Image: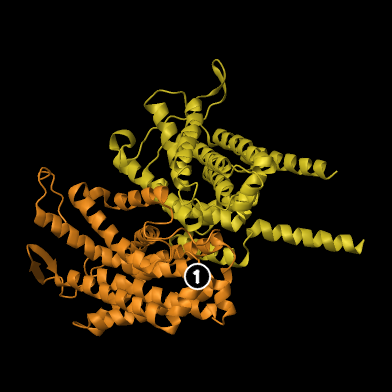
Chain colours: A orange, B yellow
Amino acid sequence: MGHRSGERFMIPTTEFAQQAVNGLVMGGVYALIALGLTLIFGILDQANFAHGELYMIGAYATLYFSEFLGGGMYPLAVVFAMFSVAFIALFYEWLLFRPLRGKGHLPAIISSLGASIFLWNLGLIIFGSAPRQMRTGLSEVTVNFWGVSLTLQRLLVLVVALGLILCLYLVIMKTRMGRAMRATAQDPEVAALLGIDINRIAEATFIIGGALAAAAGALIGPIFLIYPAMGLMACLKAFVVVILGGLGNVMGAVIAGFALGVIESLGAGFIASAYKDFFAFLVLILVLWARPEGFLGKTAKKAG
Amino acid sequence: MKGSAKLITSLLVLGGLIYVPWVVKNPYYLHIIIMSGIFVLLASSMNLITGCTGRLNLGHAAFYGIGAYASTLVVMKLGFPVWLGMVMGGLITVLFGVLIGIPCLKLKGAYLAITTLAFGEITRLAMINFVPLTNGPLGIRGIPGPPAIGFNSTPLISFESKTSYYYLILFICVLCLLTIRRVLNSQIGRTFMAIREDEVRAETVGIDTIQVKIMNFALGAFFAGIAGSFYAHYVRFISPDTFTLGETFTILTMVVIGGLGTFYGPIVGGVIFTFLPELLRAISEYRMILYGLMMSVAIIFMPDGIVGLLQSWISGRTEKGDKST
């Protein structure tokens, strides 16, 4: 991820490929976080500003579970973390979102923002402000493809992210629950008339979203440092992805997630690494200005 | 009758506020009271945007910071007099308010919140990274205070004591709040609320929503900028650490718990949440946990905040009284 100022004249293709692949890895993580967000947004028409905290808790849960279980049990720790965060997300739905459903956008935004501040600062007290590192052993092994080197951990992120995305796609397209979710997203009132229990749908949506966010945290934990404030920026970027991909659009979120990861990585690698987060914001503001419904979204289905 | 009762109450409150420095001798307490004045301004200006038109602005601390930096820079780099600098602080913030307001015109709800949040972060990054202008993370020291007011060599107010700053912020607050009140009670204020309730319908009845929304952002930015420029010349030191997202969250807590969309809510919230951290000094590390919790609980159980509760309680009582007579 080096920033080389001397080599601006000609960008070596391998370095370009390296940055792009690193970007894809980050993109997988962004896509996982954004998927939950876009589902909640699209199906329930509520914005969850505390989604980044699910990712943060997922990372810490994986860290503690893998320390508790001992070496080599990282995959099991990931699964445990996904289950526990899914449960927390269920509480979100019960406590923060259900009482405010149908009362406009602002109250739910404020209540989830409150939850975000609460959990992030609670994290500071419980986990401490010092960043933690998670070791899985997978980061020490490097594989090479055509001059692009990738640690096993990064490869794992890509593979697991793609696997989870495929699972989600199958759930949404092939199961009864998935069909009910799509129906609710299209028209909650008609869906309710047809006997769909919106509360069950909401619970399922939050459980899926929580598990995916936790998986993202668990996967990225061994690559970067884990700290209580990590959720905030992640949530912001996930929103960028949701907006880019179009509200409630699952495939859109996946493509936009990978795109944002690559744009950021290339921007940081070849322009200026200090402005990495700046590129995400720039993309966001440009998109919102030019095409508020997102690049892959249809025109906004719902007004107000 | 009712109008005159209101006038008498306001005059009594104002008289009490003028009397404060005689009662509060401790300069530290006076400092907190001055800070609460700044936060009343910040919360009221955020409420103007978030409460009145229902558009959540998560970049409010950036407006506060732009006001502080703008005023400081025009005074220290361009040699403007301090009073003019403070006004310029407000006006330059309006410029930024309009600048961010225009791309946000089409946005609402979460989209607007995210965009303004991004704007706030970009502003903070700019404060940290434009070192020649802002001196980066170290901040700017030695900002001059306002010059003494008086005749020739006999100053009436010298701006060396906390008391003089107290009267200055009191004056600014009263002026700004009266302006906000006038705006809210005018045609424009009603169009703000029309947009909050139903933007499409507001447009249908002939409200130029674009113009109103830009004006709304500009007004909110102006008062936040004034608060920022007062802060800079009062504390005489500014750094990017003051104008963070955390500050925006604190202001939002004040607005939500005081009463979103009410005139008195942000005033009550601003005062309470400037004093609360001082009272809760022992558990200061839990402060933001408490704020987050209170924000969520308040928006679910008392969406109109403390002032909304009080208003419904008072109107309930008078209704009962009316029935019995």
Q: Kindly indicate the quadrant of the structure image that contains residue B38.
A: top right
Neighbor class of circle 1 (other Cα within 10 Å; few <14, some 14-19, many 20+) is some
Where is the N terminus of chain B found, in terms of image quarters?
top right
Q: Kindly indicate the quadrant of the structure image that contains residue B175.
A: top right
**Residue shown at 57%/77% (left/top)?**
A192
In this orientation, which residue lies closer to the viewer: B135 or A143? Answer: A143
Instruction: Label 1, secondary structure: give it.
Output: helix
In this orientation, which residue lies closer to the viewer: B246 or B95? Answer: B95
**Residue shown at 46%/35% (left/top)?**
B95
Where is the C terminus of chain B found, in terms of image quarters?
bottom right
In this orientation, which residue lies closer to the viewer: A175 or A216? Answer: A175
- Give the chain letter at badge 1: A
**Residue shown at 54%/39% (left/top)?**
B223
In this orientation, which residue lies closer to the viewer: A93 or B140? Answer: A93
Can the viewer see residue B99?
yes
**Residue shown at 48%/65% (left/top)?**
A112
Q: Kindly indicate the quadrant of the structure image that contains residue A210.
A: bottom left
- Is A83 above or below relative to A162? below
Residue B258: x percent and y percent?
61, 55
> Residue reaching furthest top?
B152
Residue A228: x percent and y percent?
35, 65
Residue B297: x percent and y percent?
56, 67
- Is A208 above or below relative to A108? below
**What residue would you read off at disc 1?**
A186
Residue B271: x percent and y percent?
59, 50
> Residue reaching furthest front?
A298
Can the viewer see residue B283?
no
Query: How many badges with numbers are in the image?
Result: 1
Side of B17 where B246 appears, left or right: left
Which amino acid lies under the numbered mark 1 shown in the image of this protein? Gln
- Is A98 above or below relative to A195? above
